[in-house]
Amino acid sequence: MFTYLILNLVFLLSLILFLPKTLSKPTRVFWLTLAVLLVLTAVFDPIIIGLGVVGYDDSLLLGIKILGAPIEDFFYAIYAACAVPLLWNRLGENHDVRKN
């Protein structure tokens, strides 16, 4: 069965394709960004779910919720905290946005 957890794991594993050859230890800024994203997810996901903006098939969820948000939603915050800097660094090598 294809669940939200499997979908999230596929996206998180896709980060391996973008990982630099040498990994540095996560910085304090990374951990702060991740914390902010997780808190925002915990606060606003239950609101948008409650308003019916998004909905989930409960049979595809693990059933674990944090303040009303399915645990699977927190994967998106983790993915964003990891993927955005990786993509920024990868694209920044070839495209200097400051030139425009």
Image (spheres, rainbow, N blue to C red):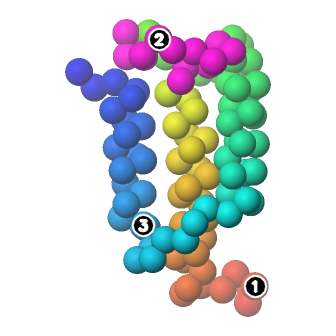
- The residue identified by callout 2 is 63
Determine which quarter of the picture holds residue 76: top right
* 38 on left or right of 7: right
Q: Looking at the picture, how far across and down is residue 52, in whole percent? A: 64, 14
Q: Nearer the viewer, mark 2 or mark 1?
A: 2
- Name the amino acid, label 1: Arg
What's the magenta region?
A: 59-71
Q: Label 3 to label 2, Cα distance in Å?
A: 31 Å
Q: Label 1 to label 3, Cα distance in Å?
A: 23 Å
- Name the amino acid, label 2: Gly
Q: In the image, what residue occupies the spot 42% across and 16% down?
A: 62
- The residue identified by callout 3 is 18
Q: Quadrant of the C terminus?
A: bottom right
Q: Does 38 sit above or below residue 44?
A: below
- Please rate how many residues cluster around mark 1, counting C-alpha atoms within 10 Å: few if below 14, some from 14 to 19, many from 20: few
Numbered tag placed on residue 98 in the rendering: 1
Which badge, 1 or 3, comes first in the chain's sequence? Answer: 3
Q: Label 2 to label 1, Cα distance in Å?
A: 45 Å
